[in-house]
Amino acid sequence: MIALDDLGRLGKTSNIDYAQEILRLKKELNAIILAHYYQESEIQDLADFIGDSLELSRRASETKAEVIVFAGVHFMAETAKILSPNKQVLLPDLNAGCSLAEGCPASLFKQFRAQHPDHISITYINCSAEVKAASDIICTSSSAEKIIRQIPDDKPIFFAPDRNLGRYLIKKTGRDMLLWEGSCVVHETFSMRKLISLQLEHPKAELIAHPECEEPLLEKASFIGSTSGLLKYVQGFKGKEFIVATEPGILHQMEKYAPSNTYIPLPPEAACSCNECPYMKLNTMEKLYLCMRDRSPEITLAADIIAKALVPIQRMMEMSK
Ligand code: 13P
Ligand code: SF4
């Protein structure tokens, strides 16, 4: 069967072994495949490296490969391009966005900054390259606390775009910050009602959560961390039950590295799969294969945006060492 994908590319044939073809193309292109934990399991299994946003950025800046194939979302691939501007960066689906990045348009972000000229801006990496270019320091969920603690006490901080992560960091560091009102569609969907019934059913289960979750849920969590932080945490236990409040893609590595534990993904309120990131899941094995075959879609950014956005990203790299 031959069909056009949603980019109008001729490609799908029922007899293609995507995994085999992807590995062949990887050699041919001298490419590295970087994948986020929220990608589907088959993609994670093919990747050269799987990590959280900070680790993926580090890998993108260090790689000797000529082509970076980014199995993640748009802002992650843009960050890779900013860090490795001379490499070709491919993203299987250009529509793989992020609700946090979409909720923080560069024009409004710049306007807000102009209204608060005394504030230093610490911006979560889940934003566009243009927003990064207008920021002072970038952070990820695994580096934010360390970065905030290095800002002199008398310097007011503006934190964007995730209000939940922002509130969590205010509590953790005791630092007051001006917050942008953005949120992640996935981490806001978890149901407190279903959490309570799960806890009744599994009284020994520990709730672990990503800091993008809302405050009432975070208050009930025994551990809060980035995707890598959560993965590392569960590896310290054997035969334990965990209720996991983040995108369920992470369960694949948890089951691989700490198989004796039981992982229960926290469900959303409605009878839907809204706890899966709709953007991350746009990437499929077929699209991964096609983007490598066609060397497209490719991330391109204006040179001035790359130069400006690199400065706050490098500050993050330095401050998170
Ligand atoms: P991590 O940096 O923890 O992997 O988070 C990325 C993300 O988009 C979470 O929703
Ligand atoms: Fe963005 Fe949320 Fe998806 Fe992460 S899970 S990429 S924050 S929409």
Image (spheres, rainbow, N blue to C red):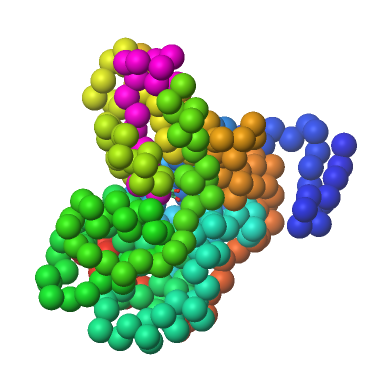
Of 115 and 223, nearer the camera is 115
Of 15 and 303, nearer the camera is 303
Say if residue 190 shows up in the picture.
yes
Work out whether 114 lies above or below 181: below
Residue 73 located left or right of residue 318: right
Look at 41% across and 72% down and name the residue there.
132
Where, by quadrant of the figure, is residue 82 drawn? Answer: bottom left
Q: Quadrant of the N terminus?
A: top right
Q: Quadrant of the C terminus?
A: bottom left
User: Which percent across, then down, holds residue 237?
Assistant: 26, 20
User: Which percent across, then down, holds residue 47?
Assistant: 48, 40
Q: Residue furthest left?
A: 153
Residue 29 located left or right of residue 238: right
Look at 31% across and 56% down and name the residue there.
167
Of 149 and 41, nearer the camera is 149
Please give the range of residues in magenta.
198-212
Residue 187 located left or right of residue 13: left
Any magenta on residue 28? no
Work out whether 123 lies above or below 32: below
Of 17 and 100, nearer the camera is 100
Look at 26% across and 76% down and name the residue there.
120
Work out whether 277 lies above or below 103: above
Where, by quadrant of the figure, is residue 229 drawn? Answer: top left
Work out whether 22 lies above or below 243: below
Q: Residue furthest right?
A: 1
| Image label count | 0
User: Which percent across, then down, holds residue 75?
Assistant: 49, 61
Any magenta on residue 206? yes
Say if residue 256 shows up in the picture.
no
